[in-house]
Image (tube, helix red, strand yellow):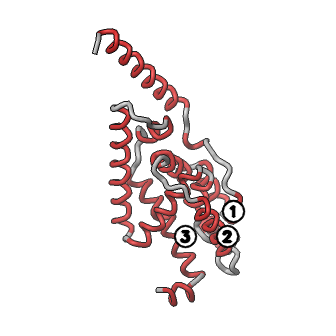
Amino acid sequence: MSTLGRITNSLAAATVENSLSLFQFNFDFTFQKTAPPVEFNPIGQALSVNRRFNAENGAAHRTARKLGWLFEQIVPDTPRLLKVYGLRVCEILAIPGVNPVGSAADGPFREYVGADCTSLWAAATSGISALGIHLLACMLARAWDAQTATAIWVELVKARQADILEKLGKNSMVSETSVTAARQDFLRSELSDWDASARSWLAQADKALAFHVTNIC
């Protein structure tokens, strides 16, 4: 390669790097929300105030957004599956007794009464890819105990981060959002919370549909 070619490539790489750095600097995952698919809208109304805030503006939303962006280019496009998933969740939440509302009688546990759909609403307000990742969280929670599932999440994230940065180094096509997510920290504790919320929702749904679960299994 000629000297001019090397200089041109170096300048191009520097421009991309600076653009991504600026993008990262200006971007705050916490405040980026996406309108959820209409099928999921009732879920937000079903959450307690604290859970909804966490799902839309707190740590749960940040985790969902980061995971959604990290895996967005490899999450399968399944619009019909996601539509049915949203409708089914809302059907379950509408079953009497599944999602009781906390009252003063519950004292400090008032905000923890009812179905925990925090991670699901966080995903619904973080984009379609995040919903796909939430389905994966449910699959891992169903197949593995919490400690193992969290360890799997840690490895999945590390592998995906490495893959994205490797492709970037080879000048392959990678979205800016994926690169930004790949450069974020993913704490084991937040991945554990992500798994725990999905696991909590599955437990509540199983309890609501105990007859069906018993007969299917």
Q: Do the residues labelled 2 and 1 touch (CB within 8 Å)?
A: yes
Judged from the image, the secondary structure of the residue bearing numbered disc 2 is: helix
Q: Name the residue under label 3.
A: 201
> Disc 1 marks which amino acid?
Glu
Q: In the rendering, at what x and y percent does residue 189 appear? A: 41, 55
* Mark in front: 1 vs 3: 1
Q: Mark 1 points at which residue?
A: 39
Tell me the number on the disc at residue 90: 2
Q: Do the residues labelled 1 and 3 touch (CB within 8 Å)?
A: no
> Disc 2 marks which amino acid?
Cys
For the residue pair 78 and 120, the one nearer the viewer reads as 78
For label 3, the crowd category at 10 Å Cα-Cα, with few meaning under 14, some 14 to 19 and many 20 or more, is some
| Image point (37%, 64%), residue name | 149
Q: Which residue lies furthest to the top in this view?
A: 4
Q: In the rendering, at what x and y percent does residue 23 appear? A: 52, 29
Location of residue 212 (image quadrant): bottom right
**Any part of residue 105 in sight:** no
158 vs 174: above or below: below
